[in-house]
């Protein structure tokens, strides 16, 4: 599900050559390392994972961080992402999340939920492509 959502959500934003090399095995290994450092919330439909959110202590700030939120494209616009976000961030007062600067869909989603850019930016690399990210913050 994670590989599939990346390949759908980032088509046109990340090079196809990078998206086509994503593997379930590599993502499984990543999750085996990542799960102990934070929480994971999963949405199921008929015993099939349709979305997930992952959050925990911030990697670069004193805030709480939403590490990831992905929903299958068939569930976009259904409120599933909103529900996952509520579960993952329950009780948190200062939350950050990083988004690709070019990912207008994700950025609109965060903005609808009260997040605003806070001026922080960074560059990540996918394959040989540099990707600009902006940081969003929501303070309750």
Image (cartoon, rainbow, N blue to C red):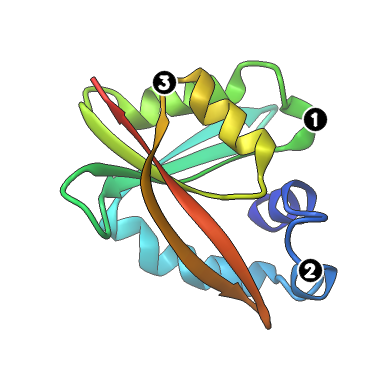
Quadrant assignment, res 107 = top right
In the rendered image, residue 125, in percent from the top left (x then y), is placed at 57, 75
Tell me: residue 103, above or below residue 93. below
Image position of 67 (left or right of 127): left
Q: Residue at (15%, 48%) from the top-left corner?
A: 62
Is any atom of residue 9 visible in this view?
yes
- Mark in front: 3 vs 1: 3
Q: Considering the numbered disc 3 on the image, is that residue within a helix, a strand or a loop?
A: loop
50 or 13: which is nearer to us? 13
| Sequence-wise first label, 3 or 2 | 2
Label 3 – label 2 distance at C-alpha: 30 Å
Q: Is residue 130 above or below residue 94?
A: below
What numbered label is drawn on residue 114?
3
Q: Which mark, residue 15? A: 2
Where is residue 77? Give x, y as percent: 71, 19
Work out how far the residue at label 3 is from the one at label 1, CA to CA, in angstroms.
24 Å
Mark 2 Cα-neighbour bin, 10 Å: few <14, some 14–19, many ≥20: some
Q: Which residue does the image show at 29% across and 23% down from the upper left? A: 90
**Picture residue at 25% right of the left edge, 59% below the top:** 60
Dot 3 or dot 1, earlier in sequence: 1
In the rendered image, is residue 49 in sight?
no
* Mark 1 / mark 2, whichever is N-terminal: 2
Q: Residue 74 carries which label?
A: 1
- Tell me the element at label 1: helix
- Contact flag, marks 1 and 2 (Cβ < 8 Å): no
């Amino acid at each position: 599900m994670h590989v599939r959502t990346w390949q759908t959500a980032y088509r046109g934003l990340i090079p196809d050559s990078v998206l086509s090399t994503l593997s379930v095995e590599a993502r499984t290994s990543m999750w085996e390392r990542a799960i102990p450092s934070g929480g994971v919330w999963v949405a199921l439909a008929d015993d099939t994972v349709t979305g997930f959110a992952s959050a925990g202590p911030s990697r670069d700030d004193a805030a709480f961080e939403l590490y990831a939120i992905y929903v299958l494209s068939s569930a976009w616009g259904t409120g599933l992402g909103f529900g996952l976000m509520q579960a993952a961030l329950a009780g948190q007062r200062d939350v950050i999340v990083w988004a690709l600067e070019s990912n207008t869909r994700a950025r609109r989603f965060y903005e609808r939920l009260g997040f605003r850019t806070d001026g922080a930016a960074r560059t990540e690399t996918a394959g040989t492509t540099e990707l600009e990210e902006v940081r969003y913050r929501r303070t309750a």
